[in-house]
Image (cartoon, rainbow, N blue to C red):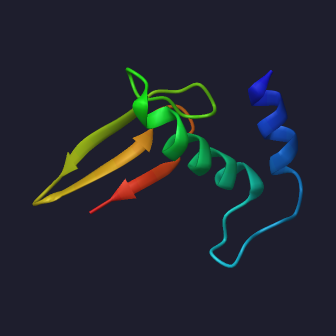
């Protein structure tokens, strides 16, 4: 049900000053308030959030299902 709701919200032609849609905003809010404290970490879409190392010294935190990038270095 949540995937259908996110799909419909993504059809609204709204972008903030950083280029995020309403669904991106909701995913970020959900991850920082609840998802990062679950085991395993969860995204609003229901996917697992993983952190991988990027050579030479970086890392990325993103959802494995929807490819939403939460953090990087």
Q: Is residue 51 left or right of residue 40?
A: left
Q: Which image quarter holds the C terminus?
A: bottom left
Residue 25 in percent (x, y) is at 67, 55
In this rendering, the count of numbered labels is 0
Q: Position of residue 32 (x, y in %)?
A: 50, 46
Q: Residue at x 75, y 29 (%)?
A: 3
Quarter of the view holding residue 36: top left
Task: List the single residue furthest toward the bottom.
Answer: 17
User: Nearest the camera: 19 or 38?
Assistant: 38
Residue at left offset 80%, top offset 39%: 7
Above or below residue 8? Residue 4 is above
Q: Position of residue 65 (x, y in %)?
A: 53, 31
Residue 55 shown left or right of residue 19 in the figure: left
Q: Answer with left or right where residue 16 lies relative to residue 28.
A: right
Residue located 80% across and 21% down the image: 1
**In the displayed structure, would residue 22 be above or below residue 52?**
below
Above-or-below relation of 54 to 43:
below
Residue nearest the viewer, comparing 22 with 32: 32
User: Residue at position x 31%, y 51% from top?
Assistant: 60
Residue 52 in view (yes/no): yes
In this rendering, does residue 67 appear at all? Answer: no
């Amino acid at each position: 049900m949540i995937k259908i709701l996110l799909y419909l919200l993504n059809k609204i032609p709204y972008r903030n000053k950083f280029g995020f849609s309403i669904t991106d905003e909701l995913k970020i809010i959900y991850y920082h308030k609840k998802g990062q404290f679950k085991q395993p970490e969860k995204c609003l879409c229901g996917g697992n959030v993983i952190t991988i190392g990027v050579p030479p010294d970086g890392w990325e935190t993103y959802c494995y299902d929807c490819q939403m990038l939460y953090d990087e270095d």
